[in-house]
């Protein structure tokens, strides 16, 4: 008996029953429920603050875009992390990202038309929302990565990127609910900037993170 | 017993009937012709998928039959990436461990072969990447010539020792992962076989074999140049 046969013998002796993965849709719903709960707690602790212009067209479009980005990226995570499923799912959040950035761009253009270059003034302390997004994203992103620990041996970088994008986009939507009076430029800079930075950090550290929490040791 | 015999007869008549675990290990496999091989490949996948579903429910015989059946397929993939040799067999074992670790991710009703092939190919790419990293690391280690010089009173002896230590270090690093782990646990950390098995995914038997192979490779790698030829 060679050592591969010995290994097979040993592994089959350890074949305890396992719980199969639920469908990506169900897992997405579960994670979104967890994310909504966490974000609702944070929003409740700060108090819901929405200015009338936040519910008007470009801001509302931008908010829906970030929410959709979060939800679609989460669904993509549960697809690309499973071996044998198509990697093309990773492009799923792209239309939502376009909607989000489109809303932000529209908001910036409108502000520029109304206020001129003053629309791009930086308010002191406005980067608070970027740190709030980061703080909410960390537990959300880690929970999502733990739910797809097996992705470390499949598509670690793509999964980590999408998980970071999903967590950060949902956090950005949540932060918009209690940070009132931000100009579109501020949102573009701090919200979109934080989402891009968090997704990039997640993408870059994905392989290492999964090696740590996943099945494949390096 | 009669029911089992009936089921086995049905399984041999109907290609889509659920195979019994025993069939996979004991039934003689008829030789395949060239034209049959493609259909057979599809059926292999179906059969493996069925076995995996049984294995997920804790059926050890089905799992054993499945792992035995997929090993040659995995070997084929590993050879394509890593060539022949010990690295290839180490890759097969590595893939089997990963398959064991994430067997819950196989979903009922989905094709089995793409699931397995994704895992195998990704793992081989990871191993190739690690091999490249190892080679680069070896070069870096050679550049760091000032590391560990214990006998300060005799510079010549110290240099010689440092050189030997570096060589051993590089040779151990160059070993395949399972062998490297065996040497580190059994020889460098001086753990017992049982302790080492508890620290790793390998059984005591596999560790013993890996260590033996590793020492042979090390002896070959470290013997003086003139003795090699």
Image: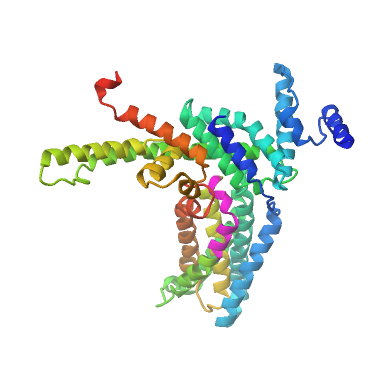
Q: In this rendering, would A45 be left or right of A129? A: right
Question: Residue at left 83%, top 34%?
Answer: B17
Whether the magenta-drawn stretch holds residue A24 is answered as no
Q: Position of residue B151 (x, y in %)?
A: 15, 45
- Which one is in front, A40 or B82? B82
Up the image or down, B97 lies above or below A172; here it is above
Q: Position of residue B161 (x, y in %)?
A: 20, 39
Q: Is residue A62 visible?
A: yes
Count all numbered tags in the image, as a single digit. Answer: 0
Whether the magenta-drawn stretch holds residue A146 is answered as yes
**Magenta segment:** A140-153
- Which one is in front, A111 or B54? B54
Q: In this rendering, would B164 be left or right of B114? A: left
Q: Quadrant of the C terminus of chain B?
A: top left
Residue A41 position by quadrant: bottom right
- Which one is in front, B22 or A91? B22
- Which one is in front, A85 or A4? A4
Residue B166 position by quadrant: top left
Question: Residue at left 35%, top 32%?
Answer: B218
From the image, give the main secondary structure of the stretch colored magenta.
helix
Up the image or down, B132 lies above or below A166; here it is above
């Amino acid at each position: 008996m060679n050592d591969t046969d010995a290994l097979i013998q040993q592994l089959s002796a350890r074949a305890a029953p396992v719980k199969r993965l639920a469908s990506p849709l169900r897992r997405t719903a579960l994670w979104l429920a967890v994310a909504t709960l966490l974000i609702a707690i944070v929003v409740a602790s700060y108090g819901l603050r929405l200015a009338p212009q936040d519910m008007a067209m470009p801001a509302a479009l931008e908010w829906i875009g970030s929410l959709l980005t979060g939800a679609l990226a989460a669904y993509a995570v549960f697809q690309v992390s499973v071996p044998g499923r198509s990697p093309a799912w990773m492009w799923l959040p792209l239309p939502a990202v376009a909607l989000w950035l489109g809303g932000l761009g529209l908001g910036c253009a409108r502000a520029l038309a109304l206020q001129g270059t003053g629309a791009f003034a930086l308010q002191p302390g406005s980067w608070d929302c970027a740190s709030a997004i980061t703080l909410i994203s960390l537990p959300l992103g880690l929970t999502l990565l733990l739910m797809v620990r097996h992705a470390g041996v499949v598509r670690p970088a793509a999964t980590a990127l999408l998980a970071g994008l999903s967590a950060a986009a949902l956090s950005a939507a949540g932060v918009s609910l209690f940070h009132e009076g931000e100009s579109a430029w501020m949102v573009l800079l701090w919200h979109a900037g934080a989402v891009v930075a968090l997704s990039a950090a997640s993408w870059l550290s994905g392989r290492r993170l999964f090696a740590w929490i996943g099945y494949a040791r390096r | 017993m009669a029911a089992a015999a009936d089921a086995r007869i049905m399984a041999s008549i109907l290609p889509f009937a659920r195979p019994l675990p025993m069939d996979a290990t004991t039934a003689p496999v008829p030789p395949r012709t060239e034209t049959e091989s493609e259909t057979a490949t599809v059926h292999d996948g179906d059969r493996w998928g069925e076995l995996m579903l049984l294995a997920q429910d804790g059926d050890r015989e089905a799992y054993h039959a499945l792992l035995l059946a997929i090993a040659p397929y995995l070997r084929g993939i590993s050879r394509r990436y890593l060539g022949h040799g010990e690295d290839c067999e180490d890759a097969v074992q590595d893939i089997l461990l990963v398959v064991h670790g994430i067997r819950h991710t196989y979903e009922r009703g989905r094709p089995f072969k793409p699931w397995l092939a994704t895992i195998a190919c990704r793992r081989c790419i990871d191993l190739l990447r690690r091999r490249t990293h190892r080679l680069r690391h070896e070069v870096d280690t050679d550049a760091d010539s000032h590391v560990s010089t214990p006998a300060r009173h005799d510079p010549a002896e110290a240099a010689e020792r440092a050189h030997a230590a570096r060589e051993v270090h590089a040779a151990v690093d160059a070993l395949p992962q399972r062998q490297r782990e065996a040497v580190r646990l059994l020889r460098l950390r001086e753990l017992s076989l049982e302790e080492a098995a508890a620290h790793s995914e390998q059984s005591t038997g596999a560790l013993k074999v890996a260590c033996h192979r590793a020492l042979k490779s090390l002896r070959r790698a470290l013997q003086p140049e003139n003795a090699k030829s």
